[in-house]
Structure formats: C-alpha cells, structure tokens
Amino acid sequence: MANKLTDISRVRKVIQMHHKGKSKLFISRYLSLSRNTVKKYRALYQLLDISIDVINNKSDAALEQLFSKSPEEVLTPKLRAVYAFFPYMERAKKDRGYQATYVGRVS
C-alpha cells in the first residue's frame, strides 16, 4: 500500500540513527526500509525543526501525529513561493508570443 505510515518505532529509530550520522543506505538496510522511506522521514524531521530530545521524549501517538501530516502542511516558505508562481506562469504561457523568461528570484 503506497504512502502507508511506517511503524512509529522504526520512524523513531530512523531519526535517532540519522542524528548519530548514519547514512541513508545504512539505515534502510538496518531497518529493512526503502531508501526513499528513510529519505522521507529524514526530510520531515528536518522540516519540523525539532531536536532529538523532543523526539525521544514524545509518545508514539504524538510522534505519529507529527509524521503523518500531509506534505501540504509542511511546505517550506520557498516552496510556497514557487507554488504561488504557477498561476502566473500558466497565464503567461497562454499569451500569444510567449517566451520563457526568468521573471524574478524566488527566495
């Protein structure tokens, strides 16, 4: 089943091992998870911007709430700016004589 939430104890171990400096490949092999799953939880951990102590002190239910948020809920400001730019580009492409030009810096 796609996008199924991994057992929360494994998520906790992914974060702990990442914090200890273990590689994505090592973590995926050790916990029998795909590299993309490890990458997903590492990225969510970094986006949440919380310390390892908070992760260790949270209950499984609280951690599950944190890591089961949809991707739209944890968008970075930079990515929000890119998404806000899409409607402009769609309108511009419909204009006659459209030329792909760089309009401004997304930061």
Image (spheres, helix red, strand yellow):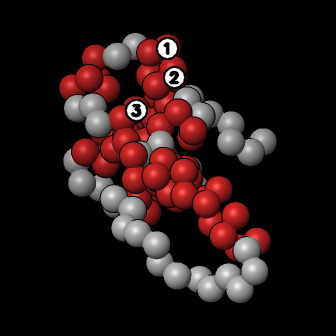
Q: Earlier in the sequence, mark 3 or mark 2?
A: 3
Q: Nearer the viewer, residue 93 or 12?
A: 93
Q: Nearer the viewer, residue 107 or 48?
A: 107
Mark 1: few, some, or many residues within 10 Å (few <14, many ≥20)? few
Q: Secondary structure at mark 2?
A: helix
The vertical placement of 23 against 16, above or below, is below
In the displayed image of the protein, which residue is found farthest to the front? 96
* Inter-mark Cα distance, 1 to 3: 12 Å
Image location of residue 80, percent across then percent down: 48, 47
Q: Which mark is residue 28?
A: none
Question: From this viewpoint, is residue 30 visible?
Answer: no
Image location of residue 47, percent across then percent down: 37, 42
* Inter-mark Cα distance, 3 to 2: 10 Å
- Residue flagged by tag 3: what amino acid is it? Arg
Q: Is residue 33 left or right of residue 14?
A: right
Position of the C terminus, as image quadrant, is bottom left
Q: Nearer the viewer, residue 58 or 44?
A: 44
Mark 2: few, some, or many residues within 10 Å (few <14, many ≥20)? some
- Residue flagged by tag 2: what amino acid is it? Glu
| Residue bearing mark 1 | 61
Question: From this viewpoint, is residue 85 visible?
Answer: yes
Q: Secondary structure at mark 3?
A: helix
| Residue bearing mark 3 | 12
Q: Secondary structure at mark 1?
A: helix
Q: Mark 1–mark 2 contact, CB under 8 Å?
A: yes
The vertical placement of 60 against 47, above or below, is above
Q: Quadrant of residue 63?
A: top left
Q: Nearer the viewer, residue 27 or 41?
A: 41
